[in-house]
Image (cartoon, rainbow, N blue to C red):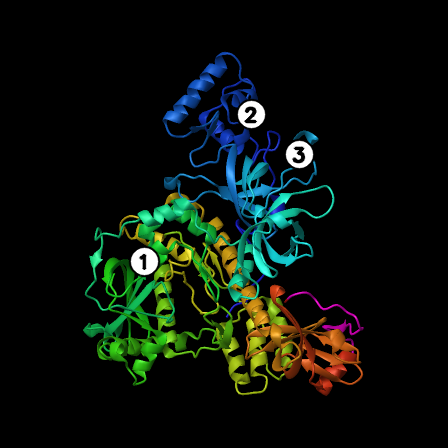
Amino acid sequence: MTREPRGRFPSTGQRAGKHVRATTNAPAAEPLNIIHGVLPPRDVILRFIADHPQQASKREIAKAFGLKGEQRVELKDLLRDLEEEGMLQKSRKSLIRPGALPPVTVLDITTRDKDGELIGRPAEWPEDAGVAPAVTIRQSSSPAGRNGKGKAPVAGLGDRILAKIFAASHHGGPAYTARIIKVLDKRGTATLGVFRETPGGGGRLMPVERRGEEMVIDPDDVGGAKDGDLIEVEVARLGRFGLPRAKVLTIVGSTGSEKAISMIAIHAHGIPNIFPLPVIDAAEAAEPATMSRREDWRSLPLITIDPPDAKDHDDAVYAEMDPSPDNEEGIIVTVAIADVSWYVRSGSALDREALKRGNSVYFPDRVVPMLPERISNDLCSLKEGVDRPALAVRMVFSKDGRKIGHTFHRIMMKSAAKLSYQQAQSAIDGNPDDKTGTLLEPILKPLYHAFDVMKRGRDRRQPLELDMPERKILLKPDGTVDRVVVPPRLDAHKLIEEMMIQANVAAAETLEKKRQSLIYRIHDGPTLAKQEILREFLATLGISLVKGGNMRANNFNGILAKAEGTAHQTMVSEMVLRSQSQAIYSPENIGHFGLNLMKYAHFTSPIRRYADLIVHRALVGSLGLGEGGITPEEEAALDDIAAEISTFERRAMAAERETVDRLIAHHLSSRVGEEFDGRVGGVTKAGLFIALPDYGADGFVPISTLGNDYFIYDEAHQALTGEKTGLGYRLGDSVRVKLAEAIPLAGALRFEMLSEGREMPTAMRSFHKSGRRNAGPAHRKAGTRPPRGRR
């Protein structure tokens, strides 16, 4: 429902270019009032150490304040007193504030901020110290290293570095900046590419990343790789001249098999996909949760309803009529969520790895989980007939769908049944199987009745009803694409979705009431600029959009209703979708525009989303539900955490989308020259993007191949129109195309247009001739190179 923007990252939105390294002459905040030759008071000493970690030894402090003789002895006594009081702690030869980074630290580079700056976190961090602080990594702009000699070390995503730490001179972003001293471990030592044999033995590595470098592989270093294999190599040696030489480490698989394709996205986006041994050990050592501080709800027949191929089950539901005479015809809905916070404690090895991943990533052939299988698929999965710990919310609704109260509980439950969406829906539709037959009256019918009641509240709320079909790739046993399907949207899906939404609302409301810091799921309304683009487009269809900044979701629902059943229904839905902002995580609440909710936090999927785990910890801590609550250090880092996991969510979305593109391009690569029915899914100055609805594919028609006319790009009408003929193509048009080229590794398809352009309305043609506002020349010159890849 929401679009992905070019995003922000770990800090609070301040430009990374303003982060200045602190030095003696440029302290981090307001300058200290240093009087040379006078022993400073305690607060000045503490402030100096916090602002100048690189000068925090006793000797450097004495030098900075001009202390000599007896004054140095007094300084030593003062520092010892501060240590004994816990205000300072020793780190090698330096002193640091508790919870602060030492002046030289080993960092793991985990991500980038919105300006491309690398962000790292300490590789080692005490488990009881909460979330490790974020550090902005400064790459040297000079080719020379320290003292002007040698080459300055350069690091990238996934690298481990030894770094000099400085206090940042700004407020609101990461508290530290760092200069790279040495790269200890480079992720780049393993490079992914396609092996191509060369005559006489050996071969070449053809990179799968655009910025990758071709490498030579000697015959002795081939390692059994065959032409077309997807391989991982390490650089064997670099010469002053010629290509670098590499050695094959691993044969991932043949590029003729889709099972290798998801590895390209994993590698290209730096998604951690192998759990470190300490994380695996921690997961394997975990013991099942006990009944300590838990309510026994094992007799309540909660059930899970999931996709048929789901391996982890993190939510269960139950519904019943409210027996209270004060709520006649009201209902009680119970949602139980796996208690991941019991097993994954703040600052632990499991926690650090989960934060590093941010969320699970789902590909057609595999899942890259946020947590090891021992946790996600076993101890935290709400398996049928097995005792499992959970956090449950019991919500009471009136007969008109208004939530009139809720309570949270830490429980032990036992799932009464594991059902698929199709099973549950089939039973309600009158076709129960052996399993659902006994569940129909006592469990399923009350659940569906509860959904009917909750739907009354949803209809009154009027969230954005932009229901775009979601395609799913089905694979054959050998890993090749079988077909692309659009699964039907069942009431069973909507039932679970609405119950999860209400549970998320209840979590946000409870934490706000407790004045507990948390991470919200927020969704801003469309910007005024996007509204104006949409308004101009709709005007060409005779549909009006109200002006002003106070736009609501139901304004868009009205537009969608007007377009329903018309020839331009799909086109309008696409444009409304493009006008939306990206939903993100934030400790600052602005509400959720799409859902039309003022308080909303992700609570229902802690197995696969770190945001939900934070909300669970906040609930446990603020409600006094036992161990595993949020820590003060974690609360202080919520800005960084929210920005980081928002970035990781976008990373996952991009990787999943690119993998689907590559899979479809691979699937269609044997059909070059065939004709397909498509739809114009995008219009640019460079040409047309064509969607193949039956395949879930997108390809490009370069404008140079459209015909012998001069085409005008009209942003308001989302069209390309021939200046001479008045014929053109518009967003949403049905067209016939021929597949001219398929590049599987790039996920790119190129089409040739077979359909003639349609006659554009006279208003549009005169619009082009009179000033061409929002229009631009679209080059049709032969030989124009189409853009590489997708939008």
Question: Quick one: which residue is furthest to the top in this view?
Answer: 69
Mark toward the start of the polypeptide (2 vs 1): 2
Foreground mark, 3 or 1, reads 1
Q: Position of residue 325 (x, y in %)?
A: 19, 74
Tell me: 376 left or right of 150.
left
Q: Position of residue 422 (x, y in %)?
A: 36, 77
Residue 24 falls inside the magenta stretch: no
Labels 2 and 3 touching (C-beta < 8 A): no
What residue is shown at x 66% (from left), y 51% (from top)? 215
What amino acid is found at the position of numbered circle 1 in the picture? Asp
User: What is the magenta segment's predominant secondary structure?
Assistant: loop
Is residue 562 shown above or below 548? Answer: below
Which quadrant holds residue 5? bottom right
Q: Give the residues in magenta.
A: 770-789
What amino acid is found at the position of numbered circle 3 in the picture? Gly
Q: Which residue is mark 2?
A: 34
Q: Which residue is mark 1?
A: 378
How far is mark 2 from mark 1, CA to CA? 59 Å
Q: Position of residue 154 (x, y in %)?
A: 62, 41
How far is mark 3 from mark 1, CA to CA? 50 Å
Is residue 466 shown above or below 513? Answer: below
